[in-house]
Amino acid sequence: EDSPAVDSPFAAAVLRQGRKYLQVGREGLFPRALHPDAPEMPAVCQRFLTLGRLMAKAFRDGFTVPLPLSEAFFAVLRGDDLDHRHLPPEAATGGTARGLARLLHQIEEIQAAPGLSEPERESRVRALSKQPCSLVAP
């Protein structure tokens, strides 16, 4: 089994209810790709907001939340910049990582392209986000 160890009722409940918007692999939890216009987007964002608030409160109180987050997911929560090298192996995400890696590689190519103005870069990256199964960043 490729799933992380679930050693608490809290983690088991999150995993059970979050399968629609979380990938579970050896590295831990990793968000699934979601189209920006998906009807479930507000509910998913609300759940991540609630999870963030819970973790912030636990951190403030010195409590470790028994939830197996992947290193890349935790880095995003800290506000770190990620690139395609931070994605978990393809087998750990049911193929989602391959699509995300491709998208991130396209974004990195746009950012590094010589001769593009900043508005052109932003426009090209924005156009990528309108494609189905694109990476959604708040």
Image: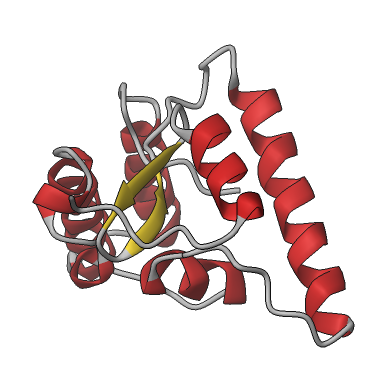
For the point 18% across and 50% down, the residue is 1
**Residue 126 left/right relative to 14:** left
Q: Nearer the viewer, residue 109 or 117?
A: 109
Choose top left, top right, bottom left or bottom right for residue 109: bottom left
Choose top left, top right, bottom left or bottom right for residue 123: top left
For the point 45% across and 64% down, the residue is 73
Where does the image place residue 18, in percent across and percent down from the top left?
Answer: 53, 35
Establish if 126 lies above or below 74. Answer: above
Q: Nearer the viewer, residue 33 or 18?
A: 18
Where does the image place residue 106, in percent across and percent down from the top left?
Answer: 18, 51
Establish if 129 lies above or below 114. Answer: above
**Residue 66 left/right relative to 25:** right
Q: Nearer the viewer, residue 93 or 119?
A: 93
Q: Nearer the viewer, residue 53 or 9?
A: 9
Where does the image place residue 58, in percent across and percent down from the top left?
Answer: 81, 73
Establish if 130 lies above or below 6. Answer: above
**Residue 63 left/right relative to 87:** right
Q: How is the image coloured?
A: secondary structure
For the point 29% across and 53% down, the residue is 3
For the point 27% across and 70% down, the residue is 86
